Image (cartoon, rainbow, N blue to C red):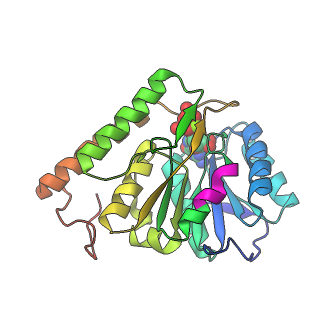
Amino acid sequence: MSEVTGAVERTAGYPGVGRVLVVIPTYNEAENVVIITERLRQAVPAVEILIADDNSPDGTGAVADRLAAADEYVHVLHRSGKQGLGAAYVAGFRWAREHGYDAVVEMDADGSHAPEELTRLLDAARDADVVIGSRWTSGGEVVNWPWHRQLLSRGGNLYTRVALGMPVSDATGGYRIYRVPALDKMDFESVTSQGYSFQVELSWRAHRAGLRTVEVPITFAEREHGTSKMSPLIVGEALWRVTLWCLSERRPGLGGSRRGYGDSTPRWP
Ligand SMILES: Nc1nc2c(ncn2[C@@H]2O[C@H](COP(=O)(O)OP(=O)(O)OP(=O)(O)O)[C@@H](O)[C@H]2O)c(=O)[nH]1
Ligand SMILES: [Mg+2]
């Protein structure tokens, strides 16, 4: 069961986009959640924040409650235990839809996604269904990442682009905006991917549903506090899922469909 704390006020929102909810999934981010919330409130006062915490053992949930009690623009979704990034986002998106938001933003708690760059993404969202903050498009960059992480990300994105034939430079990137009606067209509630694969699956669904995706260059920075939840398992999940979707496109019998974007009722992977 999920429980929500924090007042839910109607706000004017961001011009041309509407009411925006930034969903920040957290697991053991007690230090980061304070920093990111302050930076975000400072950078874009018009957007609201939902911290989706999976009952973090380090007490992130209680810290988030204190932030919500002090600021009506901050809300908390308490979840019972660690169920993965994807499940936390799906719950956050559902909450956004139920509470009448027009757009949701995905943002990590660890500072890798700079709140100071959000206005550029929001401006792009005026004319898009999906906006991806992209490290690997012209003008994008990563700061303080070791070479092996860069190689993994670049290689993973190259493989995804070629395997799926999808014109997205940073399909694994997790700094994004979705218009809520677009999320519904992607049937987001049925997404089961968890790690990087969650981002790829949503891009893939957007592509197949004929939605307009725009990439905006960002500067992605390595986290300064707390520990990464990235694991070989997460990389493996993305690899096998992309491979499966690729095969399904070519061999519909494997569970996918040749019916592609533009089709009114695509079958989801
Ligand atoms: N609610 C929830 N949040 C999670 C879970 N796993 C990761 N997160 C959050 O998702 C965001 C991204 O996780 P990271 O550990 O930074 O993963 P990453 O950005 O792919 O890896 P690094 O680049 O090494 O930091 C952070 O805000 C995490 O706290 C989870 O199971 N549940
Ligand atoms: Mg991170």
* Residue drawn 28% across the image and 77% down it: 264
**Quadrant location of the C terminus?**
bottom left
Q: Give x and y (percent) for residue 244.
A: 23, 46
Q: Is residue 81 visible?
A: no
| Looking at the image, residue 17 lies above or below residue 33 | below
Q: Is residue 61 magenta?
A: no
Give 171 or 22, whichever is nearer the viewer: 171
Extreme right residue here?
70
Give 26 or 161, whichever is nearer the viewer: 161
Q: Is residue 15 left or right of residue 230?
A: right
Q: Is residue 62 left or right of residue 220?
A: right
> Which stretch appears magenta?
115-121
| Looking at the image, residue 156 lies above or below residue 69 | above
Secondary structure mostly taken by the magenta-highlighted segment of the chain: helix
Q: Give x and y (percent) for residue 105.
A: 59, 59
| Looking at the image, residue 144 lies above or below residue 5 | above
Give 138 or 194, whichever is nearer the viewer: 138
Q: Give x and y (percent) for residue 108.
A: 61, 45
* Residue drawn 68% across the image and 70% down it: 14
* Residue drawn 80% across the image and 58% down it: 68
Question: Which corner quadrant of the image does residue 163 belong to?
Answer: top left
Q: Is residue 221 visible?
A: yes
| Looking at the image, residue 263 lies above or below residue 110 | below
Question: Which corner quadrant of the image does residue 257 belong to?
Answer: bottom left
Q: Give x and y (percent) for residue 23.
A: 62, 57
**Quadrant location of the N terminus?**
bottom right
Q: Is residue 177 left or right of residue 202?
A: right
Give 145 or 69, whichever is nearer the viewer: 145
Extreme top residue here?
147
Quadrant of the rendered image holding ligand 2: top right
